Image (cartoon, rainbow, N blue to C red):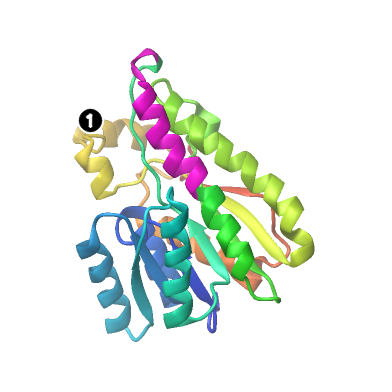
Amino acid sequence: MVDLNGRVALVTGGGKGIGQGISHALAAAGASVAVNYATDRTAADLTVADIVGSGGKAVAVTGDVGNPDDVERMFARAGNVLGPVDTLVNNAALYSFQPFEDVTLSDFDRHYRTNVLGVFLTCQTFVKQAPEAGGSIVNISTSDISSNNPGSALYTSTKGALTTLTTVLANELGPRNIRVNAVAPGATDTDGARALGLINDENVARVAAITPLGRLGHPDDIGSVVAFLASQDAAWITGDVIFASGGLR
């Protein structure tokens, strides 16, 4: 069983959807978890309450990952309550799907600010405060970096940048015993996906039919993979992208 006892994790966007599944998985393995949120405090507080109610330790930390001052405050809050962060999960992201020609400059700026700049800022701040023993960074990408579905140019291009950053940082931070990996989820049943109308009977049937394991993913499916990569069980893994997509690429 994955053991994260004594570890301190910060999960960006950790209060709902895939982020919530990750927060729960890390806490279940023994980590103390800082659950970041930008706007939905209620979801973050509920996630924290679930973890604490199950005997774990967690705190909600507010902050926009695209704002350097907010990122500094997030890590300071996590450090003051839980201790230095040795596990960073970059999950917070914007996503939308539209024809390439419909992407506006505002859309581009907002997505790249959160999905790419936000990861730069959190990784930089993480490294400044990481324990001498090192730690782990897990970036949440998407299986679309392989399938390259039409209509996903904006979102997938941000995740392509994130995936490249993962491999570069693995090489750069390896000498400091900081491992950097990415998880690429496939179609996952979340409230956010439902709000965009992506989860409906027609889409679920279509995706399930072409997925080798025959269903959509759930946040817990992603959480367990992240917990493994953060643990010593994955001590010899860095610079890799693990597809958690039921075999759909």
The answer to whether residue 141 is visible is no
SS label for mark 1: helix
Extreme residue toward the right, this view = 175
Q: Main secondary structure of the magenta part?
A: helix
Say what amino acid the circle numbered 1 marks.
Glu
Q: In the picture shown, does residue 79 fall above or below 69?
A: below
Q: In the picture shown, does residue 140 fall above or below 248?
A: below
Q: Nearer the viewer, residue 109 or 82?
A: 109
Number of numbered discs visible in the structure rendering = 1
Residue 1 location (% of width, % of height): 54, 76
Is 95 magenta? The answer is no
Q: In the picture shown, does residue 100 fall above or below 236?
A: above
Which range of residues does the magenta coloring cover?
101-118
Is 116 magenta? The answer is yes
Residue 207 location (% of width, % of height): 35, 34
**In the picture, residue 15 is in which quadrant?**
bottom left
- Taking the spot 24% from the left edge, 49% from the top edge, the residue there is 191
Q: Nearer the viewer, residue 224 or 181?
A: 181
Residue that label 1 marks:
202
**How many residues crowd mark 1 within 10 Å: few (<14), some (14–19), many (20+)?**
few
Q: Nearer the viewer, residue 4 or 40?
A: 40
- Taking the spot 42% from the left edge, 73% from the top edge, the residue there is 77
**In the picture, residue 41 is in which quadrant?**
bottom left
**In the picture, residue 71 is in which quadrant?**
bottom left
Residue 206 location (% of width, % of height): 31, 30
- Taking the spot 68% from the left edge, 71% from the top edge, the residue there is 134
Extreme residue toward the front, this view = 69
Residue 68 location (% of width, % of height): 47, 53
